[in-house]
Amino acid sequence: MARKKEETGVKRTHTDAYIEGAGIVVDQRITETLEKNYMPYAMSVIVSRALPEIDGFKPSHRKLLYTMYKMGLLTGARTKSANVVGQTMRLNPHGDGAIYETMVRMARGNQALLHPYIDSKGNFGKAYSRDMAYAASRYTEVKLDPLCNELFRDIDRDTVDFVPNYDNTMQEPTLLPATFPSILVNSNVGIAVSMASSICPFNLKEVCDAAIALIRDPETDLSEILKGPDFPGGGYILMDPAELEKIYRTGRGSIRVRSRYQYDKSNNCIEVTEIPPSTTVEAIMDKIVELVKQNKVREIADMRDETDLNGLKLTIDLKRGTDPEKLMRRLFRITPLEDSFSCNFNILIAGNPKVMGVYEILQEWIAFRTECVQRRTYYEMAKKRDKLHLLRGLQKILLDIDKAVRIVRETEEESEVVGNLMIGFGIDEIQAEYVAEIKLRHLNREYILKRTEEIEALEAEIAEMEDILGDKKKIRAIIVSELKEVEKKYAQPRRSLFIYEDIVSEENEEEEIPDYPVHLFLTEQGYLKKITPQSLRMSGEQKIKEDDRIQIQTETTNNTELLFFTDRAQVYKSNLCEFDDAKASMLGEYVPAKLGFEEGEKLSGMVMTKDYLGHILFFFENGKVAKVPLEAYQTKTKRRKLAPAYSNKSPLVAVFSGTGEQEFILTSTSQRKLLFDSAMISLKTTRDTQGVAVMSQNKGCVVQSVQLYTPEALANPHRFRTKTLPAKGAFLREEDMGEQLKL
């Protein structure tokens, strides 16, 4: 219960008599205070400050853009930003600082929006920099970007409602009749009271295509059309289809964005060129400096911001011997170089805040745009009907022009001319006023005939507009055509690319892999054994299946990369450390089962590497040989399978790897042999290259086997060695057989 009392010790003066409640302390319940004082403020912030509406704008954005539109800045030259700020004060009386800051965020120079609405000149700061301040409004110049043509199209044709400004001196629109879903094209973030909004941007072309698809079929699956957000700063989006679908359906979710970088080998440094939208260059640098001081990151020698007119560039110098990929994986995990964008699609619909998914937002926009087209069509139809009404009155005058002249001439008072024309020709007051205002020089048959010829065209146009208003399909066809036009004019390639879930490795701290010498054995059927030298010395014979034999026997170390090529043009990658140490008395581990080969898929060959230097030679049955650099199989993430691993145009016969050039013996089913040097084949960068024809085949013949040439393999190697490709080779004679072939 509220009570009032006079404050003790306060002397009332003559002035106090004119101040209501002066010197009075009011005791009031906190609930009443919140209801009377705080609730109106909260509602004002929610409804008319912080949350965007279906046209994609908050009131501050809309007032600024509409002011620039009325100033003629859609087609004219740029003007000083201070002029625009001053004019906007007529609609938005919240101070020039707030207005100019709103302008900065919408300007092209700031790079905060995917499709800026303001074409700017001068320093507008950068969205990716915390410390790069924008210049004062008296130094910068602005005009509206051509995209704003789509925001203000037909705004003067009663497409949206207008309301008085704060002092009732002019009118302003409640919404802008945007011809595309601008609410999803540019990001919009706002904090109201007890609620907030955070809308991520999407690619303009994808949004328009999604809207068109929903117009044609409300049950369309947008995941194939709307690939995902597209941030103005680019970067990589870590694709999570389930999370994206949640955002599309509910409007809430989180998107992980990773910086884009490149490694400069010559200068041993990492150059970061794109960062997540939720951070700044300075925040990233501060975090890295903190980690270096705490000795949590020791691989960094220096760091500097080299951002210039060409764009963002953060350079990180590395110490000698540092693995850049490993370092970046750690930095992604512990710094803002990888960050999350939280989505909360909270939008005002008819004055009520509502959290909606992408599907519902597009449906609301379609309904809004449908109303705009209906209102525009009705407005144009009313104008044409008025014109038709006047022309029909003029048509009646055509019957007797002399009579009209006589009525006007013989009428004594001017105020009676309209009435006399109405009586004389049976027309209404509006038509009579129109006839009375015709100039004397136009009172001729030719002029009146030309004007009345428009009647049929007007009647046809009015009938067409009535059909449009009565048929929702035609209205939606108009919306679709406008969307296609916007897409054609303003679509841009995606800036944010995707890293898909199957190639995103968990960024856990990598364990040190113990490296020690081992003997490696691989059988034809795919059994692999890794045996330490000590265990091998103490073992007896190698245990293998009866119908199997050892294909590869070599010495290496435990930390070796293995590439297993299969008969389906796929390669499975693994590290030797992932295989358990074995004994000679064991069969070993079955590679197809361990690496998850597809059903019926067989092992064709194996290649070992530590540094991905050198090349791989693929020998095919059709006599072709492909030379591919080993680095083509190196990936930044821990991908288990690569496809295609090689060309599948012809069956694979053999796989060999090496760092230098070697000679090989090819044997065909026709019993011809060919000796050639791998230096005769050039490297191809694509993994699935078909290769170069080396051994030409007779009809029905194929390459049967391939072996590495050694001096004891052939007694007369010159007979089989070729200097030109392709070559048929020669038949083997008994005197040509070397020791190996005799065996």
Image (spheres, rainbow, N blue to C red):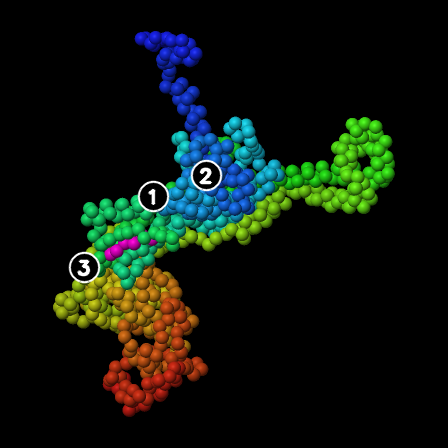
Q: Which residues are magenta?
A: 313-318
| Residue at mark 1 to residue at mark 2: CA–CA distance | 23 Å
How far is the residue under mark 2 from the one under mark 3? Answer: 67 Å
Q: Quadrant of residue 564?
A: bottom left
* Residue identified by numbered label 2: 82
Looking at the rendered image, the disc whose residue lies closer to the viewer, 1 or 2, is 2
**Amino acid type at image mark 2:** Ala
- Foreground mark, 2 or 3, reads 2
Sequence-first disc among 1 and 2: 2
**Mark 3 closeness class: few <14, some 14–19, many ≥20 residues within 10 Å:** few
Name the quadrant containing residue 426: top right
Tell me: 4 left or right of 76.
Answer: left
Q: Nearer the viewer, mark 1 or mark 3?
A: 1
Could you say where residue 23 lies in the image, as x and y percent from the top left? 37, 12
Residue at x-position 44% and y-position 36%: 99
**Where, quadrant-wise, is the N terminus in this rendering?**
top left
Does the stretch in magenta take in 316?
A: yes
Q: Residue at x 37, y 73 (%)?
A: 626
